[in-house]
Image: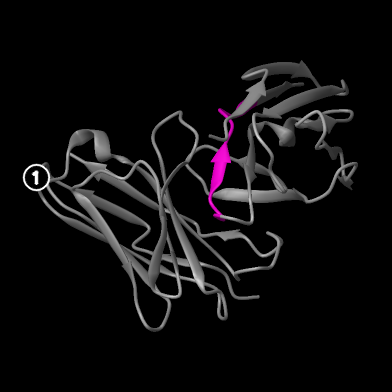
Amino acid sequence: AAGVIQSPRHLIKEKRETATLKCYPIPRHDTVYWYQQGPGQDPQFLISFYEKMQSDKGSIPDRFSAQQFSDYHSELNMSSLELGDSALYFCASSPMGDRGLGYTFGSGTRLTVV
Amino acid sequence: ELKVEQNPLFLSMQEGKNYTIYCNYSTTSDRLYWYRQDPGKSLESLFVLLSNGAVKQEGRLMASLDTKARLSTLHITAAVHDLSATYFCAAGSSNTGKLIFGQGTTLQVKP
């Protein structure tokens, strides 16, 4: 079965650089969620999109922005990177209204800021 | 605001023993998830619990949900070393879809 695809799997950036993370949801899933998991921490919700519109926003820094495109893939753009941005970034997708059974996480992108 | 708390946060146990991880959440939630995570890896979905009294079992793991008490449990039966990992519970609602995670319970099973 198709899964949520995230790219790249690993990314190393220097401070003050920018990074773009990509997420390709499961076909027919119209909702995408982004989470950040720092070392030894639980995943924290960043932002979500439904039908290409932002649907909810969590603790996402102003330096980060995201969007969902017409093919439902989503990109998380991170600028002026800081050491504290080093984390695992997960994307999840679900079909709206499925009562949660289809909620699926991708394998994540490990971002290291040096 | 929905908050999720797990306990214990760290659990060291002998193989063959039983134990329970508890997950409390603060406000009404219509979905409760349990995930397993190995170090540096992704979140592996274990169980999705959607209704009061729901009980699901897979191998040595069994999860239950009591929506009135706002409590979910993950019971480990006759633990084996392969179960060593971090276990997260997460609660959400159909209104927003986002999940709020507990702090995680790191399970270490010793031979």
Q: Chain of mark 1?
A: A
- The magenta stretch is B96-106
Horizontal side of A83 relative to A35 (left or right) equals: left
Viewer-proximal residue among B28 and A50: B28
Residue at point 35%, 41% (across, down): A59
From the top left corner, tell me how far across and down residue A48 is, in percent: 43, 59
Residue at point 49%, 71% (across, down): A25
Residue at point 59%, 55% (across, down): B95
From the top left corner, tell me how far across and down residue B85 is, in percent: 63, 33
User: Which secondary structure, mark 1?
Assistant: loop
State which quarter of the image contains the N terminus of chain A.
Answer: bottom right
Mark 1: give few (<14), some (14-19) or many (20+) Cα within 10 Å: some
From the top left corner, tell me how far across and down residue A61 is, in percent: 25, 43
Q: Amino acid at mark 1?
A: Arg
Q: Which residue in the protein does label 1 denote?
A: A16
Quadrant assignment, res B100: top right
Q: Is residue B58 visible?
A: no
Horizontal side of B89 relative to A79 (left or right) equals: right
Viewer-proximal residue among A41 and B37: A41
Please say if A39 is above or below A25: above
Viewer-proximal residue among A69 and A21: A69
Residue B98 included in the magenta stretch of the image: yes
Please say if B27 is above or below B41: above
State which quarter of the image contains the C terminus of chain A.
Answer: top left
Q: Is residue B52 visible?
A: yes
Residue at point 52%, 67% (across, down): A4
Please say if B59 is above or below A102: above
From the top left corner, tell me how far across and down residue A7 is, in percent: 36, 65
Q: How many marks?
A: 1
Residue A59 included in the magenta stretch of the image: no
Horizontal side of A98 relative to A14 (left or right) equals: right
